[in-house]
Image (tube, helix red, strand yellow):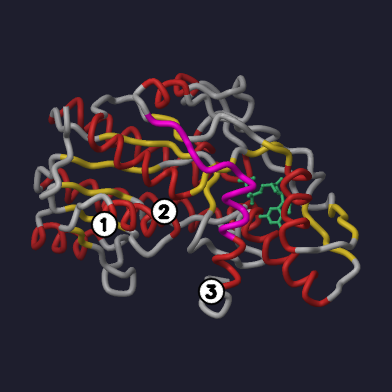
Amino acid sequence: MDLLKPSDRIYVAGHQGLVGSAIWRALATGGYSNLMGEASSALDLRDHEATEDYIAAHKPDVIVLAAAKVGGIAANSSHPVDFISDNLRIQTSVLDAALKHRIQRVLILGSSCIYPKLSPQPISEDALLTGPLEPTNQAYALAKIAGIVQVQSTRTQYGLPWISAMPTNLYGPGDNFDPVGSHVLPGLLRRFHEAAQNGAPEVVAWGTGSPRREYLHVDDLAAACIHLLKIYDDAIPLNVGTGEDISIKELAEMIAQITGFNGQLSWDTTKPDGTAQKLLDVSRINATGWKAKIDVPTGLQSTYQWYLDNIATARN
Ligand code: GDP
């Protein structure tokens, strides 16, 4: 079964972001040459009418919805209404237009934070909607859950082969290195880099360092997305991860080493830890024939190199 053809016209919504740009690169390298994308300055996907006009005019065969408002624990905690409202509107615009024009193949991307805070680890897809969410990102998580249900409902009501994938924490080239709004990995890469350059005696990281997180390189996610577009046709949103996690303290120590920082690492425990662990059970996607290939030390090294090469233009 191959549900994705090389001649398909593929619209990557959010093709300039961390995830969308990786999917675009992987599609182009894989011989899919009919790609389309729009900068958010040219097409605001929160605008239902503008999005509908775009889909009506271009009628893609496939839509990959990689556009989202994303951020780290501080951004999610301080701007929750932006995270729920922007993400709901982006999803509704794109999915309503896709349904109206009967776009055959749609893949939407969610996040491991859709699962209940106290899910048994590793978290199986079956844990969805079985308990309360982590409060620091529940606005974002609820928007993403609504996306899954919209895809499932479209499958039920119209029989279209739309699918959802739920990646774990992502990182890689094109990430957001903002010191406050970013996720921990790019945030610390930048903070340790600057401390190493300036000879600072100390770097302060947030929380206790004990939460555990799973890190997937975006190029691995992009390979998983193409794989799923080719073969997957089921209502279950599939987890995409490595199946392994590390503590934030271990991550910080790895980043200190890579950036050449030799000073002291301290923890600001007034900042939230967030959920203690959110390791995904990846047995379902592994059974379909996909597995992550890039380990964290290798991916961190290449992401740091990308940051150094793009320091002037990296998002921050
Ligand atoms: P989360 O996975 O949704 O909790 O999002 P983050 O990637 O923002 O945070 C993961 C963990 O790293 C949390 O326990 C944070 O408190 C911790 N952390 C440590 N230092 C930092 C930092 O500089 N930035 C961010 N975003 N998180 C940090």
Counting from the top left corner in percent of width and height, residue 316 is at 58, 71
Q: Which residue is mark 3?
A: 310
Residue 291 on the magenta span? yes
| 12 in magenta | no
Of mark 3 and mark 1, the one earlier in the sequence is: 1
Q: Earlier in the sequence, mark 2 or mark 1?
A: 2
Residue identifier under label 2: 19
Q: Left or right of 288: which side holds 99? A: left
> Real-space Cα distance between discs 2 and 1?
14 Å
Relative to residue 110, is residue 199 depicted above or below? Answer: below
- The answer to the question of whether label 2 and label 1 lie on touching residues, with beta carbons closer than 8 A, is no
The answer for how far apart the CA atoms under marks 3 and 1 are is 22 Å
Q: Nearer the viewer, mark 2 or mark 1?
A: 1
Q: Is residue 300 left or right of residue 220?
A: right
Report x, y in % for residue 104: 13, 40
- Of marks 3 and 2, which one's residue comes earlier in the chain? 2
